[in-house]
Image (spheres, helix red, strand yellow):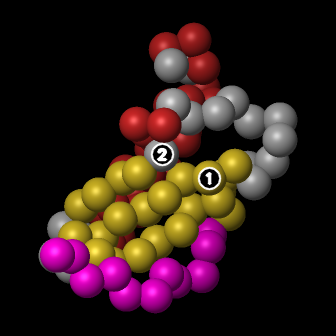
Amino acid sequence: MAHLESPREAIEYRGYSLQVTYASPQWQVLIGMAAKDRPALPPGQQLVKGWNEEETLKRAKTRIDLLIESPSLH
């Protein structure tokens, strides 16, 4: 069973809230809505997992960038 450490402070990025946590053995970023005028992410796209904290956060930000710049793709 994965051990979930307490979440770090939420980061706001382009109208979205990014909650970074470490769930052994992986980092994960939960993407939530911070601004109501932003397109919603599909449920399967709200969680980004990875082995490196910085890279996982970068991938979450890229997912948001793609959603904002190309909303018709989602």
Q: Residues within 10 Å of mark 2 (few under 14, many from 20)?
A: some
Q: Label 1's element?
A: strand
Name above or below for residue 48 compared with residue 23.
above
Residue 50, picture quadrant: bottom left
Against 10, residue 67 (above or below) is above
Against 66, residue 9 (above or below) is below
| x and y percentages locating residue 62 in the rendered image | 45, 44
- Marks 1,2: beta carbons within 8 A: yes
Look at label 1 and name its amino acid.
Gly
| Picture residue at 29% right of the left edge, 57% below the top | 49
| Residue at the disc numbered 2 | 46
Label 1 belongs to which residue?
32
Query: Residue at 48% across / 37% down in the picture?
Result: 43
Query: What residue span does the magenta drawing correspond to?
Result: 1-11
| Left-right relation of 74 to 2 | right
The residue under the point 56% across, 62% down is 18
